[in-house]
Image (cartoon, rainbow, N blue to C red):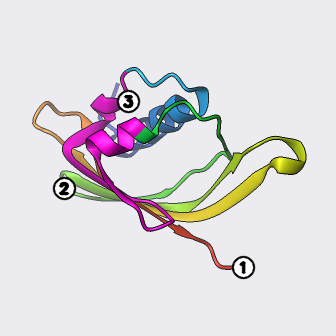
Amino acid sequence: MPHNPEAEILALEDARLQAITTGRLEGLADLFTEDFLQVHANGRVDDKAGNLARENGVPRRIDPRRPDVRIIGDVAVLTGEMTYRTGEGEAEVANRLYVTQVVRRCEDGKWRFMSVQATKVAG
């Protein structure tokens, strides 16, 4: 199979979303660099350990998305809207976000998330 960095990066994002929407979090830590940092839409900032602790299996549904991917050597930037939903029925809350993610190809050749920042979409 030919080397396709964009497909590898999109598969990484798919694996992240699959883990957090199904609550199957084993292996999630391997998707992030040790110096990972996440800035949440509410302004809270988490390092890798803090982010993994917050991914506690709270049910969320995330609308299908395909972010734009720009690759610069061993770093890639993913950008685009994402909608995730919490709650059920009348209690459902839809959160529209614009997400910027930085991914790095690590020494072992695997792509991993370095940084994620989510901003609420106006309107």
Residue occupying the point 28% across, 39% down: 49
Q: Nearer the viewer, residue 101 or 2?
A: 101
Say which mark, if any, is on residue 123. Answer: 1
Mark earlier in primary sequence (1, 2): 2
Local crowd at mark 1 within 10 Å, few (<14), some, or many (≥20)? Answer: few
Q: What is the spatial separation of the Cα atoms under label 1 and label 2, in whole angstroms?
A: 36 Å
Residue 40 image offset from top left, x and y in percent: 45, 60
What residue range appears in magenta? 27-53
Which is in the foreground here, disc 1 or disc 2? 1
At numbered mark 2, what does the secondary structure look like: helix, strand or loop? loop
Above or below, comparing residue 63 to residue 17 in the picture:
below
Which is in the foreground here, disc 3 or disc 2? 3
Q: Amino acid at mark 1?
A: Gly
Above or below, comparing residue 111 to residue 70 in the picture:
above
Q: Amino acid at mark 2?
A: Gly
Q: Nearer the viewer, residue 27 or 4?
A: 27
Tell me which corner region of the image, top left, top right, bottom left or bottom right, holds residue 52.
Answer: top left
Residue 111 image offset from top left, x and y in percent: 27, 39
Say which mark, if any, is on residue 73. Answer: 2
Asked whether 32 falls inside the magenta stretch, the response is yes
Asked if residue 72 shows in the view, the reply is: yes
Point out the image quarter for the C terminus: bottom right
Say which mark, if any, is on residue 28. Answer: 3
Q: Is residue 64 left or right of residue 68?
A: right
Residue 25 image offset from top left, x and y in percent: 45, 25
